[in-house]
Image (cartoon, rainbow, N blue to C red):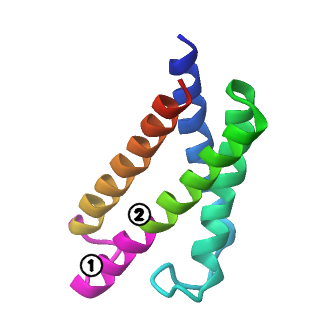
Amino acid sequence: MTSLIFFFLLTCKHAIADLWLQARFTTGSKTNLRSSRLWLHSLDHAVLTFFVALVFVGVINALWLSLLDFVLHAIIDFSKNYIQEKTGVVERSIEYWKYASVDQILHFSTYLLIVLLAT
């Protein structure tokens, strides 16, 4: 039951970081590795993951799990945006939602991995 609650809280933090907090970024690209947008967005995820994980594991493990989330989130978002840009997929297209669906599945798979590593 604890693992299920941990997973649920990670999905809640995902909604906060991916929707609420990301809305403050109005400029910058997540396909340019020099752009702060990708790194700050991934840092939002990592910090929130740290606080969620801290409830379930110690400080050191929470740091490792948040670092994992930071790295995987950056890779997933960079890859999705890079592929979208190279294939000419725009936000108002059906293809965009297909890419977004795969993106979300990969993020939720990351949270499953985090929970499995923590238990």
Range shown magenta: 76-94
Q: Is residue 7 left or right of residue 90?
A: right
Q: Nearer the viewer, mark 1 or mark 2?
A: 2
> In terms of sequence position, does the residue under pointer 1 or pointer 2 come before the other?
2
Pointer 1: what residue? Answer: 89
Residue 76's label in the rendered image is 2
* The one of 66 and 43 positioned closer to us in this rendering: 66
Residue 39 in the image: state x and y as whole percent.
62, 72
- Residue 32 % position (x, y): 50, 87
| Mark 1: amino acid | Val
Residue plotted at (52% across, 84% down): 29
Identify the residue at image location x=22%, y=65%. 94
* Mark 2 neighbour density, 10 Å: few (under 14) some (14–19) many (20 or more): some
Q: Is residue 13 above or below residue 19?
A: above
Residue located 35% across and 80% down the image: 82
In what element is the residue under mark 1? loop
Residue 59 within the segment the image draws in magenta: no
Side (left or right) of 88 relative to 16? left
- The furthest residue to the front: 60
92 or 89, which lies in front? 89
Which label is found at residue 52?
A: none
Report, in whole angstroms, how far the alpha carbon at label 1 lies from the one at label 2.
16 Å
Q: Nearer the viewer, residue 118 or 111?
A: 118
The residue depicted at 60 percent of the width and 63 percent of the height is: 42
Please state if 117 lies on the left or on the right of 79 as rendered: right
Of residues 117 and 69, the one nearer the viewer is 117
